[in-house]
Amino acid sequence: MNNPFQEQLLKAGLVSKQQVQKANKDKQKKKKQQRNQKQAAVDETHLKARQAADEKTKRDRELNQRKQEQAKKKAISAEINQLITANCIDRNEQCDIPYNFEHQKKVKRIYINEAMKQKIMQGNLGIARIEGRYELVPRSIAEKIQQRNEKRIILFDNETAELDENDPYAEYKIPDDLTW
């Protein structure tokens, strides 16, 4: 026995040998339970730390993916800008005919000449948006831009729209030179 207090009690006859052994067993059980609780607490904190690390890596992946998507969009936008600036059709003082068109549910206007207007109507030219302004580009370039970003280009097809059978004004054609 390592405990002098227990030895004194045993010598004095206040406790029996079985009581001392029982007290020692209880003490050992208590220590063992405390160790298990500490291990459980350590395991629990380790588990929480691992979950936090997993969540952080998941957030980091999502953030990295968003950054990559933004960089990709920026690169595509720069590529579109380069296509437009390299292939835009010059408009000068002779372009005095206002041409109205719809883009993103808003009516926009550019000034063109008669030849450009005919090419737009035939579908040979497209209208591209670059830095808040609109430029004319050939159809081949317009199709390339449309593949990359549909919102930056307006193409007019020379195909006629399907006619509604119940349309009372189907017989009346809208003239090409109508400006509004």
Image: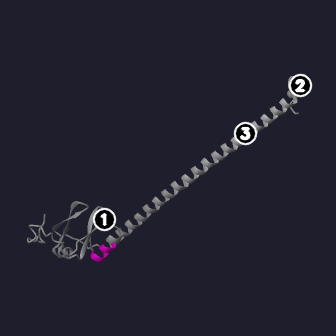
Q: Does the magenta stretch include residue 172?
A: no
Badge 2 is on which residue?
A: 8
Question: Three-letter amino acid code at disc 1?
Answer: Lys
Q: Residue at x 31, y 67 (%)?
A: 150
Q: Do the residues labelled 2 and 1 touch (CB within 8 Å)?
A: no
| Distance CA(mark 2)–CA(mark 1) | 94 Å
Q: Nearer the viewer, residue 123 or 24?
A: 24
For residue 86, above or below residue 28: below
Q: Do the residues labelled 3 and 2 touch (CB within 8 Å)?
A: no
- What element does badge 3 sit on? helix
- What element does badge 1 sit on? helix
Q: Look at the image and give the residue range highlighted in magenta.
A: 138-144
**Residues packed near mark 1 inside 10 Å, few (<14), some (14 to 19) or many (20 plus):** few
Q: Residue 133: which quarter of the image? A: bottom left
Badge 3 is on which residue?
A: 33
Q: Residue 156: which quarter of the image? A: bottom left
Q: Which of 84 and 42 is in front in this view?
A: 42
For residue 107, above or below residue 89: above
Q: In which quarter of the image is the C terminus?
A: bottom left
**Can the viewer see residue 87?**
no
Horizontal and vertical percent position of residue 118: 17, 76
